[in-house]
Structure formats: structure tokens, C-alpha cells
Amino acid sequence: MNLEEKFKLVKRNTVEIITEEELKKLLKEKKKPSVYLGTAITGKPHLAYFAWIIKLADFLKAGFKVKVLLADIHGALDNTPWNILEERYKYYELAIKDMFSKVGMETKNVEIIKGSSFQLKKEYIMDLLKLSSFVSVHDARKSASDVVKNIEGEQAKLSGLIYPLMQALDEEHLNVDIQYGGIDQRKIFVFARENLPKVGYKPRIEVMTPLLQGLTETGKMSASISKSKVDLTDSDEEIKDKIKSAYCLEGDARNGVMDFLKYVIMVIKEDRNEKFIVKRDKKYGGDISYKNYKEIEKDFIDKKLHPQDLKNAVVEEIIKLLSKIDKKKLIKIGEVAYS
């Protein structure tokens, strides 16, 4: 794979890269660059997590060393009870490993790292204290506003201000070239680039992908709204029910079902040279196959593909995708982790 091919692969399905020029330079100069994605162990991992699992696969194919930070301390800073952190970590570790395996990722170049394994070391704490002397309360709160739940209001927690400082320092202490995450992380990514040099560290490249819409009309995923997302432990019947009732207006591709097709299902199928099959009764035109997302989107917008037929096909793909997830073990751990 040449440099241009690697660049296109890393850029695929991204919203923004800060900066593309730095990425090209990195790919040219470093034989084995590294990237990390961090996820705070707060809510349960769900189907949309496959979007970043697949993006990390792009980095692997482009020759990167991939690190996944399961941020237990960050979870506690954002309202996860301290006494169940270990169980939450176990839940995330099992879920993420199962998801990697399910999409056929070669994981020899993937390292799963527990946040507290390095964030409690003397050097890290000293850097955190140093950084805190350069950062204003205003800037810390602003950077965390799209990510941290307890950052605003009269009952705002001090922990929410610590969160972005630690996320910035993780780039240095994980010794990576790139931090990757959703576009909701942008303010923290920019915060890291602006503030790491103040404590003597270089800014990193930041890569962002879009957030997948939820299944309800609002487009938001919420832990309190079960039908807004598909959980990894959902039964086949629960999956069918959620997708069947999902918001998917005929002719309008702006919904969670189409998002999952674009950023997960069709990425997998296109990379494997497989087609997406929509089964239909002969009186409605019979079965139809698609080789890429653009073909699906065009037919859907032109109302040649009915939402119900699309949903039926998506249900089959999701059930297949979750078929090897160890649901029983996740449910058992989750009884404590999410009690």
C-alpha cells in the first residue's frame, strides 16, 4: 500500500483531520505510526461502537499500531461510581474484544490499555498538576462541554474540569502520533493541541468521524431511551422490534438506520467485496442487491427502496454481526456493573 492509499484509508468516512498535511508527513516519515481511541467506561457499549471499531481497522490496514484506552478514571470523573469501576472495565474489555473479533480485525497490533494503569503514576500526576497551572477554568469547562455530563450548572463537579486535562496528557503518556474519536470530541482535541506545548509536549494529529444518529426521530442516542439504540446484548426479537419501529422516513436518508448502513454494514461489505441483499416479494420487484452505499442511498431517496424492505435487510445484518458476541457473559457482568 503506497502513501496515497494509506492516506485515503485513514481519511475514509472522517469529518475532519487536524491537520491533513501533518498526517501526510507522518505517513511519509514514520514506518509504524500509532493511534489511540479513548472511551470512558460510563454507559454500556452498543451497536454504534462498531463504527469506531471499523475505523480503527482502517488504521490497522494503513500500518498503524492501535491503542484502545478503556478510561476507568475518566469514567469516575464523569459520574460512574468508584466502587463499580472494575466491573465496568471488565464489561468494556469483553465487549470491545468481541467486537474486534466479529469484524475480522487482526488484533496483534491492537493494545487495550486500562487508564489507571498509567494515569496514577508520579510522572503523570506531576504533568497534570503542571498543566492545571496553565489552564483556566473557563477553557477547561468549554473544552469538556460536549462530552462531560457533570460540567455545567450550580452542582457542576470539579472532576469535569480535570477530565479534558487528562485526555490531553493521555496523548503524550500513551506515546501516540494520533488521537482518534467522534466529532463530539473536537473541543477537547483542539484543547490538547493548544495546551500540550505549554508543558513541553508536541501537539498530536486529531482525526474525527461523525456520530451515528439514534433510531428515534430526535436522532439522539440515550441510555434512558431503550429504542434509540441496539444494545450488544439484545435478543434477535429485541433487535427486530427496535429496527422495525426506528424512524426512517421514505425518501429521507437522514436517519439512524441509513447511518449504520453507511458507516458500518457497507464498509464491511465493500471491503469484503460482498453485496447488500434486500429481499422483496416478486410483486414488489423481487430481491435487489447493492455493491456500495451510494447505490442504496440513491434508490432510497428516489423511493425505489421502501423503508420496511430496507429495515428487514438491516435486521438480518445486525443479527449476524452480533451473533458471536458473548451475550450471556456480558449480561452476567452487567448485573453488577450497571446495577
Image (cartoon, rainbow, N blue to C red):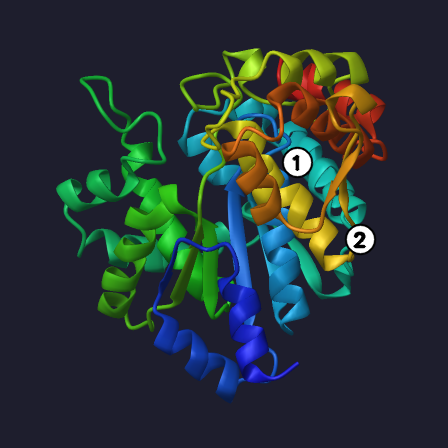
Tell me the distance, in whole angstroms, between the alpha carbons under discs 1 and 2: 19 Å
Query: Is there any visible trace of residue 167 in the rendered image?
Result: yes
Q: Position of residue 278 (x, y in %)?
A: 75, 32
Q: Which amino acid type corresponds to the residue marked 1 in the rendered image? A: Tyr
Q: 124 and 337: which one is in front?
A: 337
Where 291 falls versus 10 (above or below)?
A: above
Residue 186: x %, y % from top left = 33, 49
**Residue corresponding to mark 2:** 104
Relative image position of residue 55 (x, y in whole percent)? 59, 54
User: Does 79 sit above or below residue 122?
Assistant: above
Badge count: 2
Q: Nearer the viewer, residue 138 or 58?
A: 58
171 is higher (above) or lower (below) than 263 = below
**Between 230 and 275, the one nearer to me in the picture:** 275
Q: Which mark is residue 92?
A: 1
SS assignment at label 1: helix
Q: Secondary structure at mark 2?
A: loop
